[in-house]
Image (cartoon, grey):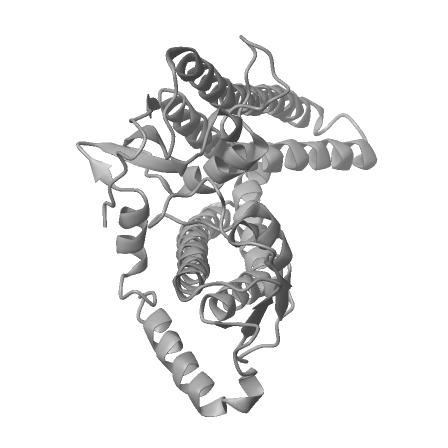
Amino acid sequence: MAYKADCISDIICRCSAEGYETLSDEFLQSFDEISLHLPDKMPVALEISGCGFSEEEQGRIRRTIRNHYQIKLSGILSDNRNALIRMCWFAVSFLLSAVLLFLVNDDTENVIVQYAYLPFWFFGYRILIFLGIDLLPRLKRTAGCRQIAEMTVFFSGEKPINEVPDQVAEQYAAEKQAASSGKTGSGLTSERLLRRYFPEENGTVSVVCMVTGIGDVVRRNTVSGYEMLTQELEGYLDRCLPYIPDHVNVRLELQGASFNDEEKRSIERAVRTFFAFRKDAADLEERDSRRKILCFVLFMALSTILLFTAENIVNKAVLEFLTMAFWFFGDYLIEFVLLDMIGAGRRCRRIRKLSEAGIVIPQQGAFTDRD
């Protein structure tokens, strides 16, 4: 693969401080889709051209690419583990519902039989969806991210890869061995790397942002009292926040420039607006989930009453329609309660906690490496 960069900020986000580098949005957009189309079990190499980077900059770029995708890989693996645990619980629930269904005899009311069938069908259907549809894309996504996390990065002016096969093979084997053991090229495990990027002190995690002035924080086209963060800083925060644990507080540190009192107030309003928008979106999602659950509970109760009272009155076609409505509302009710509502509540609580983030703006030059 090849990538052209006119300066280091085309690869490393300008908002990230030294030692806490993250990739730029433009660079990430070029590689997020590629990972899904890489040939399996093949080494990957990236040639960066367009600018003569110093040895120090080359080391920063290699380290940032490797760290970013190693952290992303750890997140994918964690998501896969959670999905597998959820499927295990679904399998247990499926077996219990099968036992319940086995105990139902022919003399049982039809509505009770339908209630016994509902969890049996729901959990069985989700297990089949996971095994038949979701599992392969998950494995492909994991393998693609692992390939990019282990890829070799070289720069124009260096010898092409096909001319130094021994060196490339040795480097690739070393990086693959480090990645398979859960370590990055710097010798840190993924968990330690996350703690290094987001250091925790007294229950507070710091998100460090490097800026050169007010223009890197607040959009220039906003007026006083209605300030908003720049798109680059918003993207940087959106990439950082998912890796912060739910149980800690958040502190946003701006480094690299000093600001007067008016600029500090503008920055604080812009940060509060950023978190307020995301909090409102999370609250709206939670309220929407609650409304859907309430509607499905009402329709479920209505279909249950109709099934119970009309079983021996209406013809078979109407009875089948009522049964279909019962299954439809029951299936979505279980899905919203077990999956959507829990996730929406967790995201809402997380955003509420982040909306209380503290803002630290030290004097210029006060930055110290936390390595």
In the picture, residue 62 is in which quadrant? bottom left
Q: Which is nearer the eye, 248 or 200?
A: 200
127 relative to 258 in the view: left or right: right
Residue that sits furthest to the top in the current view? 225
Instruction: Write the residue at 48% across / 43% down.
Output: 14
Image label count: 0
* Residue 357 seen in this snapshot: yes
Where 200 sits versus 79, above or below?
above
* Residue at 26% across, 34% down: 366
Of residues 101 and 292, the one nearer the viewer is: 292
Residue 334 appears in the figure: no
Q: Quadrant of residue 130?
A: bottom right
Where residue 247 appears, x then y in whole percent?
Answer: 28, 33
Residue appearing at x 45%, y 50% in the figure:
90
Q: Quadrant of the N terminus?
A: bottom right
Left/right placement of residue 292 relative to residue 170 reads right
**Which residue extends farthest left?**
202
User: Against 66, is 172 above or below?
Assistant: below
Residue 283 at x, y percent in the picture? 51, 20
Please state if 247 lies on the left or on the right of 116 as rendered.
left
Looking at the image, is 86 positioned above or below residue 180? above
In the rendered image, which quarter is residue 137 located in?
bottom right
- Above or below residue 318? Residue 299 is above
Q: Is residue 230 left or right of residue 327?
A: left
- Of residues 364 and 312, the one nearer the viewer is 364
Residue 20, given in percent of the width and then of the height, sits at 36, 47
- Indicate the position of residue 107 as horizontal and vertical percent values: 56, 40
